[in-house]
Image (cartoon, helix red, strand yellow):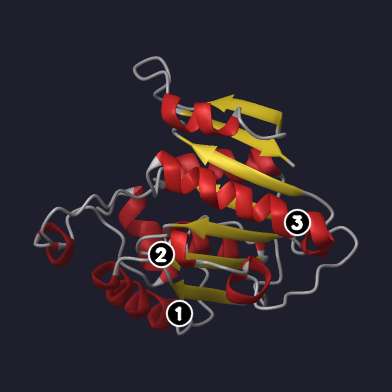
Amino acid sequence: MLSREEHLDKVLNIRTADDLEEIRGFENHTYQGTDYITLDIIMDMLELGENDVLVDLGCGLGKVIYYVNHKIGCKTIGVEGDDRIYKLLCENDKAYKNKGMNLGGNVLVLGSSGAPVRIVNSRIENIISFSEQILDGHQFTEDGSLYFYIFNPVPADVLKTFIARVIEEAGEHHFGSKKLCFVFYYMTPEYQAVVRSFPLKLEMISKLNDYYKDEYEKCCVYRL
């Protein structure tokens, strides 16, 4: 019998299981994905809608962007800078886009599922313009919001540079979104110190299933 992780991978027509031999063979790899149960909690927390855009920084094999796109129907963008991981991500991207009409099992699809998924091969520190390189000139509707999903993809100093660039660019036109949020899963003390150095408001926080074992098992949403 398939586990929930395996079942949803099959529904999405992708491979994200931790036992992928290709990744296990990589030297010094640090890939770790978000499980589907945690993603459900985070999606409910954010109340994502079809007009929103979610950008996953360090998206790995794409579990977040494909599941959110499939279940909510909003545009999702994955940014991955490790060329070895990106090669596998491209395979998932092709497979997801050919998954057919079988929605499978008990997966609830709220959106139209017509919104695109986009993947970008870039290290976060090499991004100069988020509106051009990542959002690709996306035009938001009046109620569309922009979310950056962050699961410890980079060192704290790179995160600090990233947030500073986003704030600077958002100051010009706010990317045209209704609101702009940074969604942190498993927020470390180093990341907390970075966030406190910017004018960001903690909008919501949710303790996740294993919080009683690990105090960092929580999701924190900061709004610009």
Q: Mark 3 points at which residue?
A: 170
Using the image, determine if residue 68 lies above or below residue 184: below
Q: Which residue sits at x=59%, y=47%?
A: 163
User: Pointer 2: residues within 10 angstroms few (<14), some, or many (20+)?
Assistant: some
Which amino acid lies under the numbered mark 1 shown in the image of this protein? Lys
Q: Counting other residues with Cα less than 10 Å from the Cα at mark 3, is it few (<14), some (14-19), or many (20 or more)?
A: some
Circle 1 residue: 99
Answer few, some or many: residues within 10 Å of disc 1's Cα (few below 14, many 20 plus, some between 14 and 19): some
Q: Would you name the residue on which mark 2 appears?
A: 123
Q: Which amino acid does label 3 sit on?
A: Ala
CA gap, disc 3 to disc 1? 35 Å
Direction top: furthest residue: 212
Q: Position of residue 76 (x, y in %)?
A: 59, 66
Q: Residue 68 placed where, x, y %?
A: 57, 59
Secondary element under disc 1, as helix, strand or loop, is loop
Under tag 2, what secondary structure? loop
Q: Which amino acid does label 2 sit on?
A: Arg
Looking at the picture, how far across and down is residue 71, in whole percent? Answer: 60, 60
